[in-house]
Amino acid sequence: MASSDIESIKKWISSFKAWHIVVVIGIFGGLILLQKLGGIGGLDVDRTDYKDVARVFVLENATISNKLGKITSISLIGSGRGARNKSYSSFSIRGENKSGQCDINLIKENDLWYVETATLTTGGAEYNIPVSRKTEKRSIKLFK
């Protein structure tokens, strides 16, 4: 390398400001954090498998975690399919504070499974678990 090349590299490196370094470190830190958290959407769910939909529902449901504590283990007790678009799954759940059983009814729409109702039984009490369903956003026609 010629001395002029070394001088130009030194000049280029010295042109960096402190905030450039902070931004680069922030970007790398954010990417590492995103990888550790498993992506933006949380747990991946296979909506074509009713047992997987039910399992992810139990693991991600805040009401179940509030009643039992942080979930430490989950076991499938039973599952089955009734009509073409109905199924159920039953799980034994162990939390940090309590254990319980969650019974989940699912419905199939457009070849994808969704939780319809869920009930948690723990300590002799039965709780209906709220089920929210994210609907697809549809565009609104403003002009005919």
Image: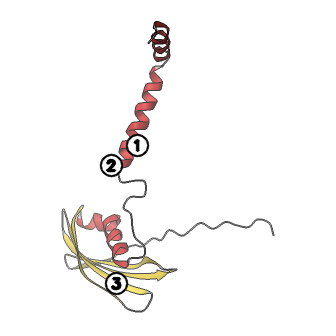
Q: Nearer the viewer, residue 131 or 76?
A: 76
Please report whichever mark, 1 or 2, sits nearer to the chain's N-terminal start.
Answer: 1
Against 74, is 23 above or below?
A: above
Separation of marks 3 and 2 at Cα, in angstroms = 32 Å
Check disc 1 and report the residue beneath it.
Answer: 31
Q: Nearer the viewer, residue 98 or 53?
A: 53
Please report whichever mark, 3 or 1, sits nearer to the chain's N-terminal start.
Answer: 1
Check disc 3 and report the residue beneath it.
Answer: 88
Amino acid beneath label 3: Tyr
**Mark 3 or mark 1, which is nearer to you?**
1
The spot of residue 111 in percent (x, y) is: 48, 80
Q: Quadrant of the C terminus?
A: bottom right
Amino acid beneath label 2: Lys
**Mark 3 or mark 2, which is nearer to you?**
2
Separation of marks 3 and 1 at Cα, in angstroms = 38 Å
Amino acid beneath label 1: Leu
* Residue appearing at x 36%, y 54% in the figure: 38
Would you call the spot at circle 2 few (<14 residues within 10 Å), some (14-19), or many (20 or more)?
A: few
- Quarter of the view holding residue 85: bottom left
Q: Residue furthest front?
A: 1
Q: Relative to 45, is 64 on the left or the right? A: left
The spot of residue 96 in percent (x, y) is: 18, 62
- Quarter of the view holding residue 79: bottom left
Separation of marks 1 and 2 at Cα, in angstroms = 9 Å
Against 82, is 123 above or below?
A: above
Please report whichever mark, 3 or 2, sits nearer to the chain's N-terminal start.
Answer: 2
Check disc 2 and report the residue beneath it.
Answer: 36
Q: Relative to 85, is 135 on the left or the right? A: right
Q: Residue furthest right?
A: 144
* Residue appearing at x 27%, y 80% in the figure: 90
The spot of residue 37 in percent (x, y) is: 35, 51
